[in-house]
Image (cartoon, helix red, strand yellow):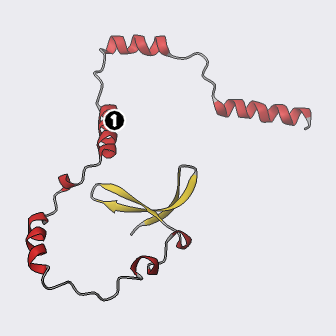
Amino acid sequence: MVCISSLVITRCERAAMLEPCGKGIALWTLRHGDEVRDEKTYFEGTGDYRADSDMMPLIQPLIKKQTQHWNPTIVIDPVQDRLLDIIESKTKVPVEPSKSKAKALASASAPSHVINIIDALTKSVAAETRTGT
């Protein structure tokens, strides 16, 4: 089962598909029909050509030499690697200060300008109804 959603990339909304993948989720960007080119423009001149039988003995050793089993290290994505490094550095657990220091820091750094949004909205609505607007 997959989820179809929309995603904004570089100020452009795109269709996206979210798919479960192991312990995570894979995101696939999708294209609309008008964004996909007709395959005839790519395969129009290919026809049903057969390989030259004299060339096959020359190319087969090259194909065997270049063929290898799939290994994830073949494909390197430096952007993905850097992103994973950033995520890892952000998720490292910081060393906790002692309990007495933690209490002192909490009381010293408690902001005095915190406003309860619900209370502020209630007062605002009450003021509006009193003035009759």
- Residue at the image position 53 percent from the left and 73 percent from the top: 33
Q: Position of residue 61 (x, y in %)?
A: 7, 71
Q: Nearer the viewer, residue 94 or 13?
A: 13
Residue 68 visible in this rendered orientation of the protein: no
| Quarter holding residue 123 | top right
Q: Nearer the viewer, residue 118 or 73?
A: 73
Identify the amino acid type marked 1.
Answer: Ile
| Quarter holding residue 64 | bottom left
Q: Which residue is mark 1?
A: 86
Image quadrant in which the C terminus is located: top right
Horizontal side, residue 54 vs residue 47: left or right: left
| Residue found farthest to the right | 132
Horizontal side, residue 118 vs residue 91: left or right: right
| Residue found farthest to the front | 54
Q: Position of residue 38 (x, y in %)?
A: 48, 77
| Quarter holding residue 65 | bottom left
- Count of all numbered marks drawn on residues in the image: 1
Q: Is residue 65 above or below residue 93?
A: below
Image quadrant in which the N terminus is located: bottom left
Mark 1 neighbour class, 10 Å CA radius: few under 14, some 14 to 19, many 20 or more: few
Q: Nearer the viewer, residue 132 or 35?
A: 35
- Residue at the image position 44 percent from the left and 78 percent from the top: 39
- Residue at the image position 92 percent from the left and 37 percent from the top: 132
Horizontal side, residue 68 vs residue 35: left or right: left
